[in-house]
Image (tube, rainbow, N blue to C red):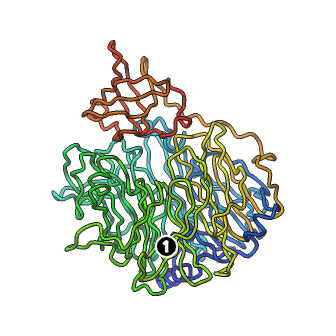
Amino acid sequence: MHAGPLKRSLIVCLAAMVVEAASAQPENVTTHHYDSLRTGWNSNETALTPSSVGGGTFGELASDVLDAQVDAQPLLVTGQTIAGAQHDVVYVATENNSIYALDAASGAQLLKANLGAPVPQSALPGGCGNNSAIVGINGTPVIDSVAGILYVVAYTYTNSTPAYYLHALNIDTLADAVPARLISASAKLVNHTTYTFTAAASRQRAGLLLANGNIYAAFASFCDINANLSRGWVLGWSAATLTPLAANELTNKFASDTDGFFLSSIWMSGSGLASSAAGDVYFVTGNSDYSGTAYNRINNISESVVQVSSDLSTVKSIFTPNSASVGHTVLDQQDLDFGSGGVMLLPPQNGASSNLAVAAGKVGIMYLLNADTLGNNAAAATGRALSQVQIGGCWCVASYYTGDDGLGRVVSSGGGTVTIWKVIGGGTPPLVKLAHSGAIPGGQDPGFFTSISSSGTSAGTAVIWAVGRPYDSTNDVHLYAFNESGLQLFSAVAGTWPNTAGNANIVPVVANGKVYVASFQSLAIFGLGGSPATAHGTAAPEIRASEMDVALQTGQHEIFGTVQAIDGSTIRVLKRTGELITVDAASAFANFQAAPPSVGHGILVRGLFDAAGILHAETLLHAKDERTMWPPDR
């Protein structure tokens, strides 16, 4: 049984990171997308091969009902001693601020801990609904399996006040190993005034990172609301004591802005902050001021891949798209966040002189970058990628594995397909398309997360796993498996997702012959000998419905539609009925209750109609482009 010591040397931490990067991922899954490079690759899987997965004997073994939606990826540690018995344990965190320890084979509940009341949707800026009816644990925790500690950030609501706490939990008991740390921070702006972290306007969505003996967490906004208060942060703490690092990274340091709209958030659809073997921290930022004039490669690094030093004191390099059609100006103006996707670091490649990275966002261009110097420094221009390919809109992150020829494979999942690219070190082009899958249906924003399992680099053993997002009124999510040629091996319902406004950024976790899929109030366990039936959770109690409606004031309406035209603060919106209405959004923008609209995309408007039929918006939020995902108008 772990005694729960927190103190670890920097040498041990770096050595563990190097081992993770070299072996991709053993049977323990202790962080988002398997390792700190975020490759999503388990290279130690011998039971689940293309032939066994596609042979008709693979299916659901068990399912568990949980107390809330799961946005965090499950984690797994083998050989844990809990209550005197040894188990392989799956740890699942819910938006109710609950941590479950479940037997990895049967799904039996071993332990459960709750870290405080979550924040209700009604208390979120603008009633932001792209999460769930409650917000508690959103970002994926991280486990130090040597120390036996699970680190997690919980969003709590006490006396009508939201607050974030960082916990270090003993994985054998789920008790705090040291007192939880209230998260706070401050940084200097360009005018030398002090800017402080605002928990009520900040969303902790990206997966946590354990590296360099530290814990790192990134913060974003809630639906771009309160953009006058919300900015992107990367904060760090000593893993041993939870003492904050002396420095932090604030992505937008301007003291003023034309529209008072700051952001440059770090959300990455839940993808984790990445770290190289050298210890640098990597992430991707989203949009800033919709005027398109706020970007600055020193003081406002919006729409960029960023490399910062391990102590968070120095931005070492950035990459910012700068073409006329998809440069940072256009991305900011049209809310086309580069930061809808995460950054994945590649292990050193044969024939390559440096490490590589890939990143893609809403536009759907995946950039191959030199991770040692991302594309620009103090003297260089932005936008210097090694290569770029079209993959489709990416609310996702790429995966990686090494083929039997010794060359790397990047697996992209933008749009609605899995695509496999070979990495040709020093070649032209550096990425060569090998195969792609058929379409994976989904009515939410495009892209999805994949994981890879294989028996080392042995030919014919790689399986690509994906979870498709809901696409119709059933709200089911499906688990898919593909081989290296893009041929579908398996598909079955793996859970539900009634909150269609919130993306199901589900990462399938593959280890020790099992696949774990967490969704809405549920964990499904798949493996050989399971039922291949498409129905999910037949042995589980009924899962209750999600209530996502924000209370409306007297006379207030809430409508969904597609933006047809924008003229200043006047917006023309086509409702699902075919009716075209005029929206006056001046008040919503003035009060920072507006996520910037974009022509051709979905929108949610709350407000009051006047006698002329003009809807005066008090809140503007993004909606899904697919109309079947829209709740009824009210």
| Nearer to me, 553 or 622 | 622
Split into 4 quadrants, where in the image is the N terminus?
bottom right
Camera-side residue of 495 and 376: 376
Query: Residue 133: x and y, percent?
Result: 54, 39
Up the image or down, 14 lies above or below 29; here it is below
481 vs 348, left or right, is right
Give coordinates of residue 211: x percent, y percent. 47, 74
Q: Residue at x 34, y 36 (%)?
A: 593
Q: Residues within 10 Å of mark 1 (few under 14, many from 20)?
A: some
Residue 143 in sight from this viewpoint: no
* In-front residue for pair 397/207: 397
Q: Residue at x 37, y 21 (%)?
A: 608
Q: Which residue is mark 1?
A: 432
| Residue 376 in sight in this render | yes
Residue 66, percent across and down?
A: 68, 48
x and y percent of residue 403 in the render? 60, 79
* Up-down relation of residue 585 to residue 317 (above or below): above
